[in-house]
Image: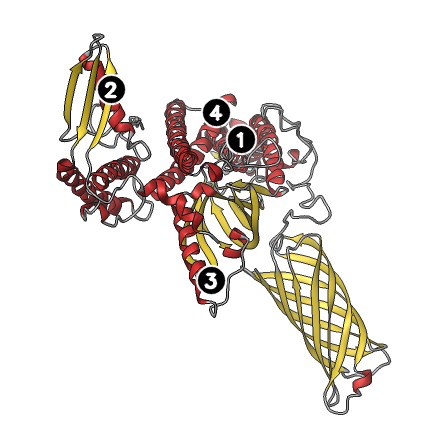
Amino acid sequence: MKKLLVLLLIIFVSIFSAVAVDVTGRGVGSTEDEALRMAREDLISQFSINVSSLTYTQDSDDGVSSSSSSMASYSLQSTQFNLLGRVENVEENSDGSYTATCTIPSSAAPLYEAQLNNLYSTINSLYSQVDGKEGQRNTYLRLITALRDYEIYQTVVLTLNPSSSVATKVLPTTRAIIENEYQSLLIIENNNTEITVRNLQQQAEMGILSVQGRADLNAALKELEENRRQQEELNAMAQEDYDLQREAFQQEMAATAAMLHESLSSYSTGNAVSGEMTFSDLINQIEANRATLQAIKDSTNESLAKLDSEFNEEVERKRSDILYAPWSSNELYNGQPTRDAREFRNQSLEVAIEELRSAYSQEANIIYGEAFNRMSSLTNYTLSYVDELNGKTFLINSFAPEVSTEIDMFAEAAGVFSGIATVTIGNSSTELYFRIPYEAWTGEKIPSRNDFQAYSLYRDTAADWLKIMQDFPEIFSIEFAFTITNDYSSTYNIIFRNYTITRNDTGEVVFSDSINQKDSLEYPSRTKLNDFTVTSGDLVDYNQFVYKRGDVDLNIEVANETEYVEEPVVIEEDRDPVSFFGGDKQFGFLGGYTLVDVYGTALWAHNGGTSPAAYGVGLKVVPNVSIFTFGIQGEWLYLNSPISMGYVGPSANLFVPLFDIMYLYADISAGVGTYFGSGVDSAKSIFFGAMADAGFYINLANSFCLDIAATASYLDKGIYYGANIGFIFIF
């Protein structure tokens, strides 16, 4: 391959000449001031590839820079660098206009080197505060500002004095990495704030929002607006950097740059998903609804607690009125109340208490009934959102703000560029490792080491591409496919299925790979979506309130409440946890995962005998468990002789979840087997076999289950039956 790739780097080194130079800007204007202003702008524009920096301001209601209840306001904006040591000259032209020059002489390099030294110390200090992604907003902003300023002054120094050692110090991080970390922080904060806002808005619509809740809602809305504004400005700056880089490509490498089509604009801001709601929308809505459900329960519990307190006070008043009232003469005998009189009063008290209980229970059921309608309606919607989340495969690409990528090295022996992608979903970020094979990226074979000249060119070319990928990450894009599943709890299981690499200079998909990396999100709420009980519900007749899940239109507001059904049965969830045949939708503790079943088996021949005809061990592997899944199954059987047999073949598996910790399963397999051992006739050692199993998988612990099953086998024209017992490992 010709050394054409090296030219892609020329634009970043061409401004650094081999010798010290002066840099001059020129301007023309109707006044001296205008001409000078134009000359300064022209001078600055000569460093425009890297000129953009960040400043921030923090304002609080009390005017004090400290943590308080007031909402801090941050601002990201572009700025220019100081023209240190500049020399300016203005001359009047014959037509009355003015021509000005603004020059930074090479002798001014030490002034900019001093700025670099100060920025270097500042960057190291700030980086120590955000290392580990635990920094606060203002620290991130100050670090981004310092890194951008460093780029500017470094460019100036290397232009004025290419041999400067000050400008070649190694920084602890890069601006791209810190901006990506800050973007992830903003996205996580945005998701958490959005959940809070939706929850409080729902409470306001239902009339259960407190005065403090209204204040919290206003503060959260303000925070959400500020967060999104900062994300937009970070995205705008990233777009500006991309546009500047693309412009440089077009200037220096028009033929190559012309193929850099509008990759950025061809994607949304992320969360690419089939349907109207993104994965973030779905998760945020589910968690907001879960929080709202708890708020309804809390409000209802408070009302019922007050009612219960009133009931108890009323009971005590009745007790005092009835039991301690003065005795009448016909209730006394020899000055003492008769037994009949005491029993009558006790009976009267019991009747009065039951009447009170009936009256208060009626009022309690009215209060709870209204809450039940709200809770069941909200739960219907939430479960529909969960089903929608579970039933989709999501795509997210490296142009989305939730994704940042970094090519960290080239493995020469393997011929692979390796990289790390950080993907933010919900309230956490996940690191994913990906690779780009050299041959897939370049379309060229890796030469043999024996061909020294060709192999040397391969190494140089790979090094050039590594530099390009690191300096111009937009030259490639990566798209991840993943699923998110939820069992109606506050835990979300994520499986990144695969990724695809696209060369954006050619628009060609060059590589795809499966990863099957698992992660999970944990939210703080532990509210169960189908649990409507409250702690002060002693006066409530729960038998009147039976939750029946029905179909809902997700476009209808939550305020549309379902009717409750009055039936004398206990609360139960009437819904099928699985509503389709196969596919990626997960269900139960095995849903979507790969199981490996290691089991022991004992087989009896169909024609009798009290002892097993064979003992054996088996292995079954089933990927991506759903209702109906294909896998592979094999067994090694030890016959009651020196001869053994082995069997392997594909299997078809049916899974039916019974409870939270149990599956009923059945599977069939068919394949080929062979005999082992002394005395085996090699001409007849291959046979056809088939087997069927049915039994139970019982969850014992995380990623660990018990297998108990009955089995029937057809092996080399022999029929056997028996039992299996084994252990399941979930991956």
Q: Which residue is mark 2?
A: 27
User: Is 412 situated left or right of 592 in this image?
Assistant: left
Relative image position of residue 262 (x, y in whole percent): 51, 33
Q: Nearer the viewer, residue 685 or 411?
A: 411
Q: Confirm or deny contact between disc 3 and disc 2 (CB under 8 A).
A: no
C-alpha distance separating marks 1 and 2: 117 Å
Q: Residue at x 53, y 34 (%)?
A: 267
Numbered label attached to residue 201: 4
What is the x, y in percent for residue 523? Answer: 46, 43
For the residues bearing labels 4 and 1, Cβ distance under 8 angstroms: no
Crowding near pointer 1: few (<14 within 10 Å), some, many (20+)? some
At mark 4, the secondary structure is: helix
> Residue at the spot x=16%, y=41% of the render?
113
Front residue of 553 and 499: 499
The alpha-carbon separation of the residues under discs 4 and 1 comes to 63 Å
Residue 85: x and y, percent? 13, 31
Visible residue check, residue 317: no
Mark toward the start of the polypeptide (1 vs 3): 1
Residue type highlighted by circle 2: Gly
Q: Residue furthest front?
A: 94
Work out whether mark 3 precedes mark 2 in sequence or the reverse, and give the earlier one.
Answer: 2
In the rendered structure, find residue 331 and report the number of the disc placed on it.
Answer: 1
Which of the marked residues, 4 or 3, is nearer the chain's N terminus? 4
Instruction: Indicate which disc, 1 or 2, sits on the residue closer to the N terminus.
Output: 2
Tell me the residue that label 3 is attached to: 454
The amino acid sitting under disc 4 is: Gln
Label 2 vs label 4, nearer the camera: 2
Give the Cα distance between marks 3 and 2. Answer: 51 Å
Name the amino acid, label 3: Ala
